[in-house]
Amino acid sequence: MADTTDTRAGESSGTASGTASGTGSGDASGNCPAAVSRRRLLGTAGAAGTAALIVGGVAGATGAEAVRGRPEPLSSVGAAAVPFHGTHQAGIVQPSQAHGHLTAFDLAPGADRKAAAALLRRWSATAAEMMAGRTPQGDGSGIALDAGPSSLTITFGFGHSFFDRTGLVARRPAALEPLPAFSADALDAKRSDGDLWVQIGADDALVAFHALRLLQRQAGEAARLRWQMTGFNRTPGVTEQPMTGRNLMGQIDGTNNPKPSDANFSARVFVPDNHAGADAWMAGGSYAVVRRIRMLLDSWENLSLEQQEKVIGRRKSDGSPLSGGTETSRADFTKMGPDGVLAIAGDAHVRVASPINNRGAAMLRRAFSYHDGFRDDGAPDAGLLFVAWQADPMNGFVPVQRKLDRGDGLSRFLRHEASGLFAVPGGSAEGEYVGQRLLEG
């Protein structure tokens, strides 16, 4: 999967969970700022004589009900908020949320640099309000009333074609050159690339959809929707303690994803703050590789447990490498099994994807699973909405994917069906909008 410890691009990485699931999102340090709720759900029990409802943690069976007596406030899941403004855009280092939308827009014919700037100004203002838990001015949809901010993050990026449409070719980063073709690709052009890219994540499905719908409406005459994909992850709080999430193959996925505490984390993920040149506007930004990767689940599930573990190179039960240890143990690629054969096969995903075997190349994966119904043959149209973050995709995603393309045993069970590469500028300060240094510089 071009990435993941068990279905991902780098062994030093997991798929997309970024960090262990089961915790609410917060700021770049992982902390959850005090909630600023735009909608508090304070329910009381129904008519007299109705038996008291047993409410576990967040909400009762019908949403607004609670046990008789003093109303309970929203849980921390709904109340958690992530700041919009900052050095980096939100939605990169925060844990992946339970619900997500990835979408791309193309500028409408006749829309120029000025129109693009006005659109990013509108979108940024709306994102800042919604992420703070407030209702944006003029929004009367009511879609997410009664919900808190739910760790909402909204992230904006620019595709290769954006610079042609806005007359900014001279300021297009060299790192934004189109990705090379890979032999396993079966890409649908209609679901790939785009002028503008938006990533939305939230721990409540209505909050995520509300953001998607409002941004689409605000695009107005400036941009048209090109493609949109919806994904999901494990809901925070469903495990007794924080745990690495699993993908749709049932594999623990995300064990060795780079962490903000790593000494080289910023160098791997973000463009340096002192970046100079025509693309100096990318200082503090990152590059997102987006891939829709369908999993051939019928074929995968026909394998025995032993065969699945051999393909991945890890135990399915706890994510430990077949060379021994626990989930977080370093894989020993030289260890031999009792039968005199390598404990971790030569084409095992963790071996082929490991930074050790890719000259240190790694990226931060932060993806969503997806299920879009069933295909004509009855097979599930399901898999991974892969998002990989790096300071330079030509030194991160590309070399790793080239190696996976040639010798990864997992590739037999995957189909790469859509792709995109986007330049995601650094965060904006109060009073600024995302991309302002590019569009007004």
Image (cartoon, rainbow, N blue to C red):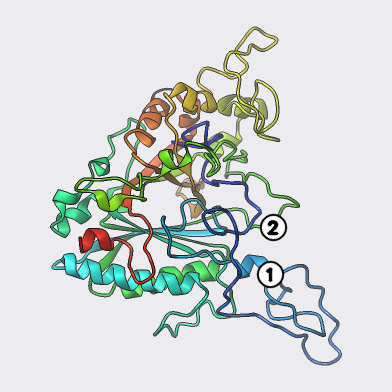
Residue 225 falls in which quadrant of the image?
A: bottom left
Residue 270 relative to residue 366: left or right:
left
The one nearer the camera, 334 or 209, is: 334
Instruction: Name the one closer to the observer, 384 or 67.
Output: 67
Total marks in image: 2
User: Which image quarter: residue 386?
Assistant: top left
Tell me the element at label 1.
loop
Q: State the residue lying farthest toward the bottom.
A: 48
Q: Is residue 26 above or below residue 280?
A: below
What residue is rendered at 62% in x and 70% in y? 79
Q: Is residue 192 visible?
A: no
How many residues crowd mark 1 within 10 Å: few (<14), some (14–19), many (20+)? some
- The residue at the point 30 percent across, 50 percent down is 282
The kind of residue tagged 1 is Ser
* Residue ID for mark 1: 75
Is 305 located above or below residue 119 in the figure?
above
Residue 352 place in picture, x, y as percent: 48, 24
Query: In this picture, is 206 found above or below 246?
Result: below
Could you tell me which secondary element the residue under label 2 belongs to? loop
User: From what the image shows, is residue 437 above or below residue 367?
Assistant: below
CA gap between label 2 and label 1 equals 11 Å
User: Looking at numbered disc 2 in the image, what kind of residue is underneath it?
Assistant: Gly
Q: Position of residue 397 (x, y in %)?
A: 38, 36
Q: Going by the image, does 195 lie left or right of 34?
A: left
Q: Which residue is mark 2?
A: 237
Q: Position of residue 135 (x, y in %)?
A: 47, 80
